Image (cartoon, rainbow, N blue to C red):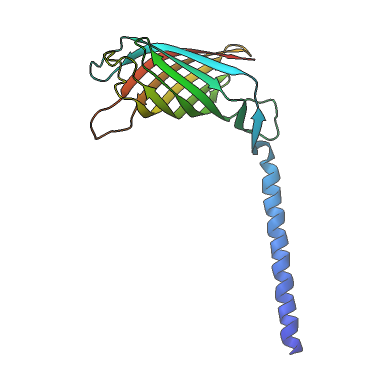
Amino acid sequence: MKKNIFIILILFCSIITKAQNRNLVLDSLNDARKSDRGLFKLYIKKFKAEAIVGLYRNRKDMSFKGMNFTYLLYLPFQFDLNYASIKAKEKLLKINPVVVIHHSTKGNYSAGLATKISFLVFPKAYLSYQLGLVWSEVTNPTANDGLINKGFNLHHNLALSYSISKSIELSLNVLHVSNGSLFKTQGNLQDVIGIGIAFMR
C-alpha cells in the first residue's frame, strides 16, 4: 500500500514539473513575440463625415451617366485593432458604424445604417468594405436610375482612402444598391463609381 502511494506521489510530482517546464517554454515564446501582440479597443471618436460624388448606371443601359451623391455620417465610436506595444502606430483594422444617405439627381433616394471595416494597406491608406441596410424611396418612377421599388435594400461600398492631413481624407469608391435578388425578378439595382472627401475634427 505504501509502495503504491509512493509511486503515485512520484507520478504527480513529475506531471507538475513537466507542466511548469511547459509553461516556462510558452512564457518565453510569448515574450519573444510581445512586440507583435495585438489589442482590440473601443474608442469614442470625434466628428467625421464623408461626401461621395459619382456617376451611376442601372444595369439595363450598362453605361454610367447620371450624377449620384452619397453621404456618410460616422457615429462617434470606433472598434479597432492595433499593436499593444506601440500606441501611436496606425490602426491595423477599424470598424465604424455609419449613417448612409444615397440619392441621385433624379430624386430617388435611400437612407439607413451600415458597418464599415477598414484594413491598413500602407501608411495613411485603407482599403474598406461597407455593408448596410437602407430603405429606398422612389419619388420619381420615370427616373431610370435603377431605383424602381420602395423598400429595404442592401448598400455596399468598396473604397480605397488616403489621408492627406489630420482633417481631410480622399477616397475612390465603388457603390452598389440592390434588393439582393440574384436569380429572381430584377428589382432595385444601381452601381456607382465615385470620388469621396471626408472631413474629421
Q: Residue at x 69, y 25 (%)?
A: 88
Image position, residue 195 (x, y; %): 45, 12
Image position, residue 194 (x, y; %): 41, 13
- Give the left or right position of residue 113, taking residue 144 as reference: right
Q: Residue at x 25, y 17 (%)?
A: 62
- Give the left or right position of residue 49, taking residue 39 as reference: left
- Give the left or right position of residue 61, taking residue 20 as reference: left
Total marks shown come to 0
Image position, residue 5 (x, y; %): 74, 83
**Whether residue 129 is visible:** no
Q: Residue at x 34, y 14 (%)?
A: 56
| Residue most extreme to the front | 139
Query: Looking at this view, is 94 or 35 the one in front?
Result: 94
**Looking at the rendering, in which quadrant would you find the C terminus?**
top right
- Give the left or right position of residue 21, taking residue 79 as reference: right
Q: Quadrant of residue 151?
A: top left
**Whether residue 104 is visible:** yes
Query: Looking at this view, is 132 or 37 the one in front?
Result: 132
**Looking at the rendering, in which quadrant would you find the N terminus?**
bottom right
Q: Quadrant of residue 3?
A: bottom right
Note whether 59 is above or below 3 in the view shown.
above
Query: Looking at this view, is 71 or 193 the one in front?
Result: 71
Image position, residue 158 (x, y; %): 43, 24
Q: Residue at x 49, y 24 (%)?
A: 127
